[in-house]
Image: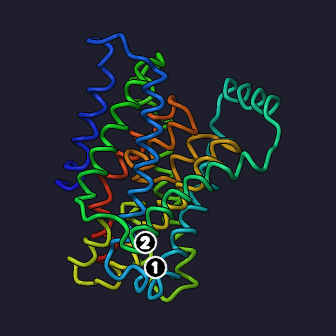
């Protein structure tokens, strides 16, 4: 619980400060805010790749447990996307139907538009990874830099949200949004359970690995502390893969489906790492939903991993 709160608190502070800034200063140039947001996002993605490349024995870990981990990641993410697509169809309002029809009439299919953003985002991570692997990057405390950029991004997103006129209370206390989060968790477990039939991991091990929901900085450490470093490696690669999958799918899912599907695939990262991408491609109206879903999942992850591991 302390781990989850330690991650949530600075994000909450950055969000509150950004959301209330307009009460004290109204002279903000929103074009400058938008450009600053994009620069921070691109730097964050490059640094994400750098930190991945700095992980000791990353290639060995990928070759040793990569197939099992990626299988669970793909199975869980695909299951979430399917379940939330059905959930959206069953629960959407007439107003959302009108928006969908209007968007369908205005938007023509363009393959370049669909693949451009995922490729651009993935390329930034790969650039960071490559320069790290080849020791081009200087030795710095990247955790502090990434955290600073992340909190700055959330601060900026909150500023944009405060100018959107959205009613936060309506979104945070919406039963549909809470039900969507529950569907995300259950769908992830369903996907992992199906995958467990085809890999050399038991059902409970697969469910425990899936319980990381993309939080790779925590899951691997937890399994190692519980006495199974090999399963910790599986969890680490699985959650790392889930984050990359979310990174690549969010731009496309935002175009072909509802933004809630993109939020669900993002899992725990919807409240931090992938939040700027959700805001950029799904729109600022989905930010509170992402914070709600990602926050709930982040809180329960430290409890779910030990629970399934002990079964």
Kindly identify the residue that appears in the image at 38 percent across and 44 percent down: 271
The quadrant of the image that shows the C terminus is: bottom left
Visible in this render: residue 288? no
Residue 243's disc is none
Q: Position of residue 4 (x, y in %)?
A: 24, 52
Q: Position of residue 61 (x, y in %)?
A: 40, 83
**Is disc 2 in contact with disc 1, using a CB cutoff of under 8 Å?**
yes
Residue 8 position by quadrant: top left
The quadrant of the image that shows the N terminus is: bottom left
Nearer the observer, 26 or 79: 26
Tell me: residue 139, above or below residue 270. Answer: below
Nearer the observer, 227 or 310: 227
Q: Position of residue 301 (x, y in %)?
A: 32, 59
Residue 207's disc is 2
Secondary element under disc 2, as helix, strand or loop, is: helix
- How many residues crowd around disc 2 within 10 Å: few (fewer than 14), some, or many (20 or more)? many
CA–CA distance between discs 2 and 1? 6 Å
**In the image: residue 106, left or right of residue 283:** right
Secondary element under disc 1, as helix, strand or loop, is: helix
Kindly identify the residue that appears in the image at 35 percent across and 10 percent down: 26
Tell me: residue 90, above or below residue 298. Answer: above
Visible in this render: residue 261? yes
Residue 143 position by quadrant: bottom left
Residue bearing mark 1: 203
């Amino acid at each position: 619980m302390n781990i989850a709160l330690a991650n949530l608190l600075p994000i909450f502070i950055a969000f509150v400060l950004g959301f209330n800034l307009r009460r004290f200063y109204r002279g903000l140039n929103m074009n400058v805010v938008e450009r600053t947001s994009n620069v921070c996002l691109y730097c964050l993605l490059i640094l994400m790749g750098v930190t991945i490349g700095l992980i000791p024995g990353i290639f060995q870990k990928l070759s040793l447990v990569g197939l099992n981990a990626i299988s669970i990641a793909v199975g869980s993410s695909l299951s979430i996307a399917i379940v939330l697509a059905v959930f959206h169809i069953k629960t959407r309002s007439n107003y959302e139907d009108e928006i969908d029809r209007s968007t369908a009439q205005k938007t023509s299919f363009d393959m370049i538009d669909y693949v451009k953003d995922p490729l651009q985002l993935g390329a930034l991570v790969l650039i960071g990874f490559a320069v790290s692997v080849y020791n081009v990057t200087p030795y710095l405390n990247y955790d502090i830099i990434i955290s600073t950029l992340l909190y700055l991004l959330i601060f900026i997103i909150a500023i944009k949200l405060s100018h959107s006129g959205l009613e936060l209370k309506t979104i945070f206390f919406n039963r549909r949004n809470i039900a969507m989060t529950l569907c995300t968790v259950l769908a992830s477990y369903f996907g992992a359970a199906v995958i467990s039939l085809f890999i050399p991991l038991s059902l409970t091990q697969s469910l425990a690995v899936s319980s990381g929901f993309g939080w790779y900085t925590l899951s691997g450490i937890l399994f190692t502390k519980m006495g199974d470093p090999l399963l910790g490696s599986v969890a680490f690669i699985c959650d790392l893969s889930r984050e990359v999958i979310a990174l690549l799918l969010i731009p496309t899912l935002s175009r072909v489906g509802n933004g809630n599907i993109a939020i669900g695939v993002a899992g725990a990262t919807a409240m931090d790492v992938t939040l700027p991408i959700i805001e950029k491609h799904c729109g600022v109206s989905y930010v509170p939903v992402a914070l709600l879903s990602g926050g709930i999942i982040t809180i329960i992850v430290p409890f779910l991993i030990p629970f399934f591991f002990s079964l």
